[in-house]
């Protein structure tokens, strides 16, 4: 099949990345597939690009995917990137395509869902944790907590990522606020629960959830982390239970909560299991070394 590739640019740039894209079409002009390449620009990740590639089922095995991949890899090289990441659900055509295209498996992810109607977390949320108290907010972090919340983001620095060349995400207050605004601009709601160290008022850990703007469907967990010096006190489970209860009370029409966890992150998987999350599917993250 004769394939025409049209390069596109996503006008929406963030403080930490921007995207370029390609649209593949057949002789009749009908779309056959598309590829999006996210180029990370923030400190700690300028070596990295992330690929999303989709081909219409009727056009698979006709060279569309390979042509789109070639364009994306060429651009990543031009931008001086050393790694391209891509993700596919286990056993799908995308999984097989990436494996056959020179990518190597670097990370497994398990996806899970909590049915809010069946959630029973009150006992966990009410457990005493001497020396700590919970606090929460919606949207952007309050000014008086912005500094300590930003500092607490380093809790994610040692998150198990297996062999992924992910780099280290460097956070500052501007980036924290930009991330919250991106959620708001999509029309979604960001809820955050933190554990505060009562000895000095600093944030010891956090958990975040994004809920659809209409309060229906499923919410999506974002980051959950506890600073190394505060681990071993059950704070992650406590914060997450409190967030689940809060969400259930505030969004009665919400069906469930979704989480994805690296297979190597056995601690967080155990936390989710203990709170009633049930696995739904698995994906594999692939990496192409340039």
Image (cartoon, helix red, strand yellow):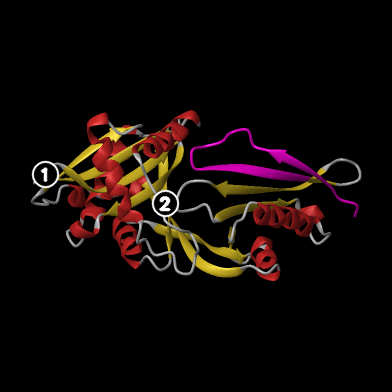
> Residue 197: in sight, yes or no?
yes
Query: Callout 2: helix, strand or loop?
Result: loop
What is the magenta range?
A: 1-23
- Residue 80 found in image quarter: bottom right
Left or right relative to 22: residue 267: left
Q: Residue at x 12, y 52 (%)?
A: 129
Kindly identify which residue carries mark 1.
200
Q: Is residue 213 highlighted in magenta?
A: no
Residue 40 lies, with reference to residue 93, above or below; the image says above
Task: Report how far apart the C-alphas of labels 1 and 2 lie in the structure.
Answer: 26 Å
Kindly identify which residue carries mark 2.
169
> Residue 87: in sight, yes or no?
no
Q: Earlier in the sequence, mark 1 or mark 2?
A: 2
Percent position (x, y) of residue 125?
20, 48
Query: Callout 1: helix, strand or loop?
Result: loop
Which of the two residues, 213 or 86, is positioned nearer the viewer here? 86
Percent position (x, y) of residue 275?
30, 56
The mark found on residue 19 in the picture is: none
Residue 189 lies, with reference to residue 224, above or below; the image says above
Percent position (x, y) of residue 137?
28, 33
Using a 10 Å C-alpha cutoff, classify the residue at mark 1 as few (fewer than 14 neighbours), some (14 to 19) or many (20 or more).
Answer: few
Left or right relative to 149: residue 18: right
Left or right relative to 94: residue 24: right
Q: Residue at x 14, y 41 (%)?
A: 201
Q: Residue at x 33, y 56 (%)?
A: 276
Q: Quadrant of the N terminus?
A: bottom right
Which of the two residues, 273 or 31, is positioned nearer the viewer here? 31
Q: Is residue 5 highlighted in magenta?
A: yes
Left or right relative to 222: residue 274: left
């Amino acid at each position: 099949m004769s394939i025409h590739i049209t390069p596109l640019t996503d006008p929406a740039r963030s403080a930490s990345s921007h995207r370029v894209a390609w649209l593949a079409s057949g002789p009749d002009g009908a779309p056959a597939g598309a590829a999006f390449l996210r180029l990370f620009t923030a400190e700690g990740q300028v070596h990295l690009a992330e690929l999303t590639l989709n081909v219409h089922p009727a056009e698979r095995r006709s060279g569309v995917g390979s042509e789109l991949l070639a364009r994306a890899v060429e651009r990543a090289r031009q931008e001086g990137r050393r790694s391209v990441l891509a993700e596919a659900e286990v056993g799908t055509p995308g999984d097989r395509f990436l494996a056959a295209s020179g990518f190597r498996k670097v990370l497994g992810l398990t996806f899970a869902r909590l049915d809010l109607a069946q959630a029973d977390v009150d006992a966990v949320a009410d457990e005493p944790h001497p020396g700590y108290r919970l606090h929460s907010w919606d949207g952007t972090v309050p000014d008086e907590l912005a500094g300590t919340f930003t500092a607490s983001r380093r809790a994610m620095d040692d998150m198990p990522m297996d062999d992924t060349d992910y780099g280290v995400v460097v956070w500052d207050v501007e980036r924290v606020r930009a991330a919250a605004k991106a959620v708001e601009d999509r029309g979604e709601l960001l809820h955050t629960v933190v554990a505060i160290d009562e000895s000095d008022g600093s944030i010891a850990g956090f958990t975040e959830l994004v809920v659809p703007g209409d309060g229906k469907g499923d919410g999506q967990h974002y980051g959950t982390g506890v600073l190394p010096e505060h681990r071993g006190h059950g704070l992650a489970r406590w914060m997450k239970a409190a967030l689940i209860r809060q969400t259930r009370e505030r969004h009665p029409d919400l069906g469930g909560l979704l989480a994805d966890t690296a297979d190597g992150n056995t601690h967080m998987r155990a936390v989710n299991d203990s709170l009633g999350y049930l696995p739904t599917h698995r994906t594999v993250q692939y990496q192409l070394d340039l």
